[in-house]
Image (tube, coloured by chain):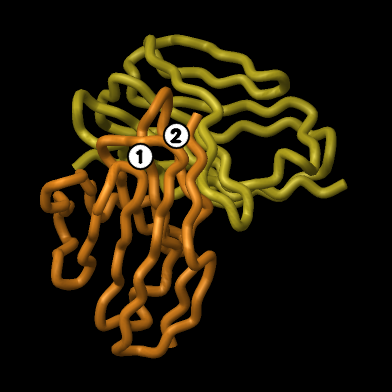
Chain colours: A yellow, B orange
Amino acid sequence: TQLLEQSPQFLSIQEGENLTVYCNSSSVFSSLQWYRQEPGEGPVLLVTVVTGGEVKKLKRLTFQFGDARKDSSLHITAAQPGDTGLYLCAGASGYSTLTFGKGTMLLVSP
Amino acid sequence: SAVISQKPSRDICQRGTSLTIQCQVDSQVTMMFWYRQQPGQSLTLIATANQGSEATYESGFVIDKFPISRPNLTFSTLTVSNMSPEDSSIYLCSVVGETQYFGPGTRLLVL
């Protein structure tokens, strides 16, 4: 069974601070996706990383896929209240369905 | 992109009753997926619903407990049968297009 461990589980910060969320596994994934889920909504895809060592930037969000394709990180610079939500990582392996982590709940206070 | 709607958005149910959740997609899709999102837990795939055939259930989920219908390429239902408090969860419908899209979820509380 493939497992994805996310840390921290919960993060409460002030507006303007930086933060990093981690997603780790002992399994290799062909790709890894990051989602954000806001209250009352379903998860929305932010990015997909495919190549080991790949770095993708989405405005203030930087996503990195580990060289061995077993882990990933999400770094947010100068967090804003609008960044508040549940951040989920999900790994894909071949034709199997996605494996989701438990998520990191981020709260950014003004 | 795909726009997915779910009904109901939330419900409070009594133990032993059943609830049917509807999922409507604005485009035709071959496969629709049903997930469960329990508090503090990861999204867990319940089953894959294919039009014109029986749904495929993941380990730990059975048709008697979670019967699924897929009458056409834009609609599916998931029934949570003989509910217990352990079934309290968010149930999400999902489809795959350019990427994976999720509905807004149905929040179920079983008393």
| Residue at image point 35% right, 36% down | B28
Q: Nearer the viewer, residue A23 or A89?
A: A89
Which is more N-terminal, label 1 or label 2?
A: 1
Q: Residue at x 23, y 47 (%)?
A: B48
Q: Locate residue A70 relative to residue B8 in the image: left or right.
A: left
Q: Which residue is mark 2?
A: A23
Circles 2 and 1: CB distance less than 8 Å? yes
Mark 2, secondary structure of its residue: strand
Identify the mark at residue A4; answer none if there is no mark.
Answer: 1
In x, y percent, where is residue A8? 55, 45
**Furthest residue to the left?**
B54
Q: Position of residue B60 (x, y in %)?
A: 17, 61
Q: Chain of mark 1?
A: A
- Three-letter amino acid code of the residue under disc 1: Leu
Q: Quadrant of residue B100?
A: top left
Q: Residues within 10 Å of mark 1 (few under 14, many from 20)?
A: many
Is the residue B83 above or below the residue A110 in the image? below
Q: Position of residue B40 (x, y in %)?
A: 46, 60
In the rendered image, the vertical position of residue A26 relative to residue B55, given as above or below? above
Q: Nearer the viewer, residue B39 or B22?
A: B22
Total numbered badges shown on the rendered structure: 2
Label drawn at residue A38: none
